């Protein structure tokens, strides 16, 4: 059972005090008419203000949403720009590293080639100097052999040697030649 039904039943039973809760019909109608008039004027004057306030609030929220969307788009754009710049910086760094490697390799090759050229030049000079020294030694040896031969020939001519004297002279000459070779 509902509350209204309980009140109506209590009012029909008599003086139970329920008539205090239920107003008289004339008062009830006058209250409803007064409420309708107040509601009409509130509807007439307050509704536009409430509608305007709600519209302003809706526009403010929409504006904030648009700003948030703009900020989000801008942030995404900045993020993409930073990522692009970072990728470019990495590419630039890799390019610089590769250039440095290439330059280092070229420099190393150049240094090795220069060292090989210098070594070849040093070897060539050493060979030339050795050949020159050999020629000097040969020339000196020829001079000494020539002088010794002349000395021997002089002794042979000056002293008319017999066979054993000639043999002794040749042996001495050979010994002197051996001494010349061991000096050098």
Image (cartoon, rainbow, N blue to C red):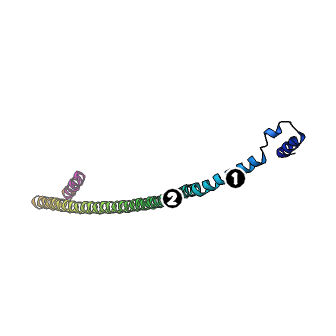
Q: Note whether 33 is above or below 116 in the view shown.
A: above
Percent from the top left, x then y, of residue 154?
A: 11, 60
Q: Note whether 27 is above or below 82 in the view shown.
A: above
Q: Note whether 14 is above or below 52 in the view shown.
A: above
- Dominant SS type (magenta): helix
Dot 2 or dot 1, earlier in sequence:
1
Tally of numbered discs: 2
Q: Is residue 171 magenta?
A: yes
Mark toward the viewer: 2 or 1: 1
Q: Quadrant of the N terminus?
A: top right
Identify the secondary structure beneath mark 2. Answer: helix
Residue placed furthest toward the right: 13
* The residue stretch that appears in magenta: 166-184
Classed neighbour count for the residue bearing mark 2: other residues with Cα under 10 Å, few (<14), some (14–19), many (≥20): few
Residue placed furthest toward the front: 26
Examine the rendering and report whether any part of residue 161 can be seen.
Answer: no
Classed neighbour count for the residue bearing mark 1: other residues with Cα under 10 Å, few (<14), some (14–19), many (≥20): few
Instruction: Write down the residue under mark 2.
Output: 63
Which residue corresponds to the image point at 79% horizontal and 38% vertical from the top-left?
20
Q: Note whether 8 is above or below 108 in the view shown.
A: above
Q: Quadrant of residue 171?
A: bottom left
Q: Which mark is residue 33?
A: 1
Residue nearer the viewer, 147 or 80: 80
Q: Which mark is residue 152?
A: none
Residue nearer the viewer, 6 or 70: 6
State how far apart marks 2 and 1 are (Cα): 43 Å
Percent from the top left, x then y, of residue 77?
A: 47, 61
Q: In the visual, does 163 lie left or right of 71?
A: left
Examine the rendering and report whether any part of residue 96 can be seen.
Answer: yes
Q: In the visual, does 141 lie left or right of 100?
A: left
Residue nearer the viewer, 9 or 67: 9
Q: Quadrant of residue 152?
A: bottom left
């Amino acid at each position: 059972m509902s509350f209204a039904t309980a009140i109506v039943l209590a009012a029909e039973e008599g003086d139970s005090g329920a008539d205090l809760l239920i107003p008289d019909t004339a008062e009830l109608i006058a209250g409803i008419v007064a409420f309708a008039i107040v509601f009409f004027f509130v509807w007439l004057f307050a509704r536009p203000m409430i509608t305007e306030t709600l519209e302003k609030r809706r526009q403010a929220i929409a504006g904030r949403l648009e700003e948030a969307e703009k900020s989000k788009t801008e942030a995404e754009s900045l993020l993409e720009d930073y990522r692009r710049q970072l990728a470019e910086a990495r590419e630039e760094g890799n390019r610089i590293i590769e250039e440095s490697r290439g330059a280092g390799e070229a420099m190393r090759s150049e240094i090795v080639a220069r060292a090989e050229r210098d070594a070849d030049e040093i070897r060539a000079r050493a060979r030339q100097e050795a050949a020159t020294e050999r020629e000097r030694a040969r020339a000196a040896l020829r001079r000494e052999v020539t002088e010794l031969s002349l000395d021997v020939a002089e002794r042979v001519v000056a002293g008319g040697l017999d066979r054993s004297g000639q043999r002794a002279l040749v042996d001495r000459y050979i010994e002197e030649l051996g001494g010349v070779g061991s000096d050098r």
